[in-house]
Image: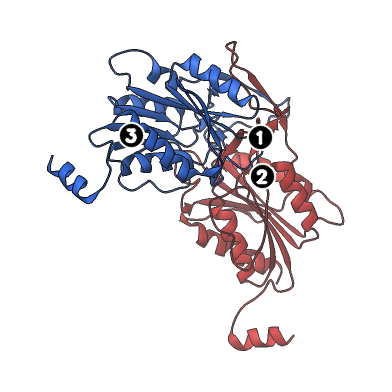
Chain colours: A blue, B red
Amino acid sequence: VILAAIEAALGVARPLSGRHAIVTSGPTHEPIDPVRYIANRSSGKQGHAIAAALAALGARVTLVSGPVGIADPAGVQTVHVETAAQMLAAVEAALPADVAVCAAAVGDWRVAAAAGQKMKKDGGAPPALQLAENPDILARLSAPGPLRPRLVVGFAAETEHLAEYAAAKRARKGCDWIVANNVGGTGIMGGEENEVLLLSDEGAQAWPKLSKREVAGLLADKIGKFFA
Amino acid sequence: VILAAIEAALGVARPLSGRHAIVTSGPTHEPIDPVRYIANRSSGKQGHAIAAALAALGARVTLVSGPVGIADPAGVQTVHVETAAQMLAAVEAALPADVAVCAAAVGDWRVAAAAGQKMKKDGGAPPALQLAENPDILARLSAPGPLRPRLVVGFAAETEHLAEYAAAKRARKGCDWIVANNVGGTGIMGGEENEVLLLSDEGAQAWPKLSKREVAGLLADKIGKFFA
């Protein structure tokens, strides 16, 4: 109450004070053997910016991050993981939460049987990597139940059929909002800018091309209004 | 001649003046589709340190580097590549050279048919990734011919049977020296230290655990003596 009074006096809007947000960010790495792994081009810039923006609006933020080359955001509790299975475990350990934003590019597949020793070329035919489906963190968070966050936001990174694939994903996963972007050959993945489509019950909003920090700020504002 | 006289006067030993060295470093990334790829845990620290150490001994150095999170060494011409095929092309473009040091962790395999669009989970069984063998840069450099560097140095990163696998690799590839290390669960890959076994016609030398910079310095000194 005193803090709120001070904030009101200072004109600081902290609409997410007292709320807990979980944000996932970055890629996952799925081991093939002790030295090789399957990765993806996510830099973590968008997810980390969202974590920082939610913290700036007063939320307590748990950021669950895959392997990235960028710094942990200030004022955010960051948990570092490598695989999708580890990310799911860290997210579940961080529940309950009011809002979850799944910005990580979680590998859909892991290698079914990762080798315990480095795989060798044996002179024969190259191997085939049998893949197995990873746990679906967004679908698990979105499933009805006592621990479901009131607001679950997913991301859809597509290289074609953006609006169609994103709408199908929103329905399939059961999340509330989807932030969709086209990552095909446009410098989005790893870049500093993002051009997104936001899908919710209100329909689709096409945001202009903005810096990832600006996208994070707008999304955090929208989340703040949701909880106002 | 004037430079050599100045160096002699200053007591600076530049045994590799006038020599051209090619060094490969870092991992390769082999695309699965526009967003996913197969990678390995090489940080490039050892290869980059070797490039810097050779330059310090007077060599003109071309460093061909896969995707790494570390800076280009000063005084070295660095060529950035992603895949094994691109690394081979850059190495061949840099020939002729007096010495080649192949420190990169080149992926043995690429995905036989990388997808042009992001692969989707379609609800059926997870896919299998059919792999195809990558070009063998070390074997190509080591093959007899007018462009073979006088000294070709390979690396062997193993998780078991280190001396045995490294000796077999040296014979199979036809390189002159092999720097072998055990990368199994010891913090070598990505770490700051290295403990190597050096195989040459003189037999095997087991170097103590040293910083990667010290390993680079010792190796560059040995290369300098080879050309003295």
Q: Chain of mark 1?
A: B
Residue that appears at 47% across and 55% down: B208
Question: Which mark is drawn over residue B31?
Answer: 1
Q: Is residue B43 above or below residue A116?
A: below
Q: Which amino acid, mark 3?
A: Gly
Residue at mark 3 shares a chain with residue at mark 1: no
**Would you call the spot at circle 2 few (<14 residues within 10 Å), some (14-19), or many (20 or more)?**
some
Q: Residue B140 versus residue B112: which sits nearer the camera?
A: B112
Q: Is residue B211 above or below residue A148?
A: below
Q: Residue A49 versus residue B12: which sits nearer the camera?
A: A49
User: How far apart in space, not on screen, are marks 3 and 2 (Cα)?
Assistant: 41 Å
The residue identified by callout 2 is: B82
Q: Residue A72 versus residue A223: which sits nearer the camera?
A: A223
C-beta proximity under 8 Å, tags 1 and 2: no
The answer to whether residue A77 is visible is no
Q: Which amino acid, mark 1?
A: Pro
Q: Which amino acid, mark 2?
A: Glu
Q: Secondary structure at mark 3?
A: helix
In the rendered image, the residue lying farthest to the left is A2
A10 left or right, relative to A166: left
Q: Is residue B128 above or below residue A56?
A: above
Q: Quadrant of the C terminus of chain A?
A: top left
**Would you call the spot at circle 3 few (<14 residues within 10 Å), some (14-19), or many (20 or more)?**
many
Residue that appears at 32% across and 22% down: A150
Residue A197 location, x and y as percent? 54, 31
The residue identified by callout 3 is: A224
